[in-house]
Image (tube, rainbow, N blue to C red):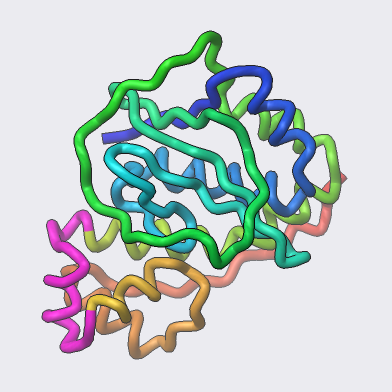
Amino acid sequence: MRWSVETLNGTVDRELDALPPDMRARFVRISHLIATVGLVHVREPYVEHVQGPLREMRLTGRDGAARALYVTVRDRRVVGGTGVRQEDAQDARGRDSAGPAAGAHGDRMSKVQDLHRKWSRDPAYREACDDLDAEFTLTRALIEARLGAGLTQAQLAERMETTQSVVARLECGRGNPSTRTLEAFARSTGTRLRISFEPVDDDRA
């Protein structure tokens, strides 16, 4: 099942426009991850559960600042609204959990892809997106492999003879897992690890 991610109105779009390029890039990368695997499967440090169907998308920047965008589910759309707020990165608490789809109110929807196309005119934004590519490619691949095997994090941890917290850290994409760890992950999900090298595209014009 694929999900679309949208913002509620022009006010939220303007608040996102005002964010630094690296935070805007993280917003788009997290949105694409949600659109691929579903909101309930994207956890900390990207999305944190608030209560009921309400979650916060966590937007951290290179300067250490953090922003939060509230997100919820409407039908098969993940909807972001109620504004972007600045906060201490240590404030958020709670664990993500699967919950029922919830309604969201709002007027006109603005797709994340439209924002991405607009922001891509900015070289700093494009560079920030490129910098996040490896992190989110790994995160998406790990989550998709586990979901494809029909496993929870706890079940996968048991197969790998490790803990759920280790699997959760792997799926956050910020660690530096060894080839041995990734091979164990692959075996436990009935997949095969492949590593490839691609030419670097230096043309960001």
Q: Quadrant of the N terminus?
A: top left
Q: Specify whether residue 93 is painted magenta.
A: no
Q: How many numbered dots are placed on residues in this image?
A: 0
Q: Position of residue 72 (x, y in %)?
A: 38, 33
Q: Residue at x 22, y 55 (%)?
A: 147
Q: Quadrant of the C terminus?
A: top right
- Is residue 103 toward the left or the right of residue 139 in the image? left
User: What is the residue that sits farthest to the top in this orientation?
Assistant: 107
**Which residues, given as a range, are shown in magenta?**
147-163
Q: Residue at x 38, y 48 (%)?
A: 50
Q: Position of residue 156 (x, y in %)?
A: 17, 73
- Residue 161's place in the image compared with 89, above or below, is below
- Residue 185's place in the image compared with 22, above or below, is below
Nearest the camera: 145 or 60? Answer: 60
Q: Position of residue 66 (x, y in %)?
A: 65, 57
Nearest the camera: 160 or 62? Answer: 62
Nearest the camera: 190 or 146? Answer: 146
